[in-house]
Amino acid sequence: MDLFGRDLITTQEWSLEELRAVLDLAARMKRERFSPKFTSLLANKTFFMFFYNPSVRTRQSFECAATELGGHAQFLEPKAMRLKTATSAGETVEDAARVMARYAAGLGIRILEDRVGYYGEGDELLREYARWGDFPVISMAHDKYHPCQGLADVMGWAEWFGKGPGKGLDVSVLEGKKLLISWGHGALARSWCSVQEAMLIGSRFGMDVTVASPEGYDLDPQVIEWARENCKANQANFAITHDVKAGYRGAHVVYSRHWMSPQAYRDGEFLKQAEIDRALKYPEWICDTEKMKLTDNAIFTHPMPIDRGHEVTDEVASGPRSCIYDVAENRLHVQKAIMALTMGNL
Ligand code: CP
């Protein structure tokens, strides 16, 4: 399979065979982390990391990934460039992308909810770079999707239901498992990217998916439709509930995270404080031990950073069934695999 040069904007746009190739390679890279088989795959090559928003995991794991593959990751921010915006003159995306592709082997972009004027603007920006730049463009989380997180999620869940973290990977163990994606109340206003990617990739791998939220927190209807179709193709169930507890019954994986409402933008502005105020009205929407008891001994997952005490209690987040650190570690391994396959000397 040839993935060289491929963009990764969402896992929904890659075939199951391609996603399995990434996960298989990631699992091998995890087991044999510093094997000479892998340490020159990006030799002499640079990966640009273009961040409109801050990050712990994404920046650090991509930078470590490039190092471990023998390459280099360069950190870029908009303020270090002179790009044209809606309010200021500057360089077009076409020019920037065409030049950047003459230097680097690939480009990662992060642009989240508070750096765009409407939902979908970040996705449009990534696709504009992908259109003009003759190199792979990888989403490092944007307003719609977070493909590297989604791959790390399913890798972690499959490890937990299989032989254990780092002991081999068989994603078929996820078939028939129930994934609950529950809205969590919180003091952060968060984008839809991580939960949308999780529901897409979980449903691709045969999981039943339930999305739970208070009324008024609908996600992107197109993504919901795709997730529904993915489930149907696998004879799996897709459900939406507005009951705070119902989705926990029989769940195998519980994902509790805050996300913004569809009313988050007005006149090109992200209404962060209004979103925070709205969310604090629902304190019962927290993942706690009582709700986890309703599950089928579920694992707790979260892409991090966690808003502890709002999205989930410390007892659950740091409990024996929490896979958060394994999933976070897997960001490194899946990104090494993605870089090796899309831009490396395989
Ligand atoms: N999960 C995730 O993308 O974490 P960061 O925002 O810290 O990169």
Image: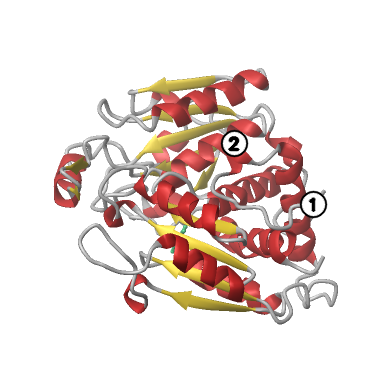
Q: Position of residue 100 (x, y in %)?
A: 53, 71
In the drawing, does residue 41 fall left or right of residue 332?
right
Q: Return the disc, 2 or 1, that comes first in the chain's sequence.
A: 1
Which is more toward the observer, 282 or 188?
188
Residue 123 lies, in percent from the top left, at 43, 47
Observer-nearest residue: 170 or 137? 137
What is the three-letter code of the residue carrying label 2?
Gly
Image quarter of the C terminus:
bottom right
Circle 2 crowding by C-alpha within 10 Å: few under 14, some 14–19, many from 20: many
Q: Residue shown at 31%/64% (left/top)?
A: 84
Q: Identify the amino acid type marked 1.
A: Asp
Q: Which mark is residue 2?
A: 1
Looking at the image, residue 80 sits to the left or right of residue 148; the answer is: left
- Within 10 angstroms of label 1, few (less than 14), some, or many (20 or more) residues? few
Q: Image quarter for residue 12? A: top right
Q: Which residue is mark 2?
A: 202
